[in-house]
Image (cartoon, helix red, strand yellow):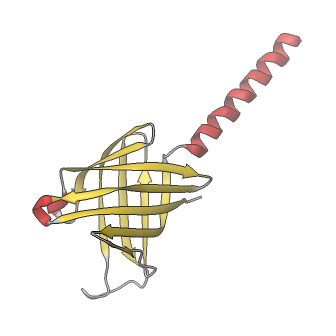
Amino acid sequence: MKKVLFVIVLIISMISCNSEKKQNSIQGTWRLISAETTEKDSTFSTFNPKTKMIKIINDTHFAFFNHDLNNGKDSINAVFFGGGGKYTLKDSIYTENLEYFNNRQWENNKFEFVVKIQNDTLIQEGIEKLEKLGINRIITEKYVREK
């Protein structure tokens, strides 16, 4: 009887630890709640409350999608972009290998970020640098885990 009870306690502990790891994992679906960009000496918000952006991360790939919330029908009001690819995560260093993006000039570039998870919030900060486009900026994005 003691052995059976021990096995049951062991299984419950393993399940509990596994769900705790999953909750603190970078994997999941995340909704952008704030975004800032720093270029040269200026920091400004790039978060647009008229759009919704989500990022989906599984064990090997990431994808992001952003669209307007008002079902825009013309080129001024209709917003949609998306991209994705493989990523690596080593400690808190998250590197996106952007393989697909509607702006093809961004494809086949790597972007390195420092990530941290606080409760249900993912904070991602790093440098976006594309010499051919003259882009060199620090971005900070905050996401909340979708339930």
Q: Residue at x 18, y 50 (%)?
A: 108
- x and y, in percent, of residue 88 in the image: 35, 40
Can you tell which quarter of the image residue 48 is in? bottom left
Quadrant where the image shows the N terminus: top right
Q: Residue 131 versus residue 57: which sits nearer the camera?
A: 131
The number of callouts visible is 0
Quadrant where the image shows the C terminus: bottom right
Whether residue 40 sits left or right of residue 65 in the image: it is left
- x and y, in percent, of residue 96 in the image: 31, 48
Q: Is residue 71 above or below residue 119?
A: below
Q: Residue at x 45, y 37 (%)?
A: 91
Whether residue 39 sits left or right of residue 1 in the image: it is left
Q: Residue 141 versus residue 27: which sits nearer the camera?
A: 141
Q: Is residue 121 above or below residue 10?
A: below
- x and y, in percent, of residue 68 in the image: 39, 79
Residue situated furthest front in the rendering: 41
Q: Residue at x 53, y 43 (%)?
A: 25
Q: Residue at x 40, y 69 (%)?
A: 36
Can you tell which quarter of the image residue 125 is in? bottom left
- x and y, in percent, of residue 85 in the image: 29, 49
Q: Residue 141 versus residue 14: which sits nearer the camera?
A: 141
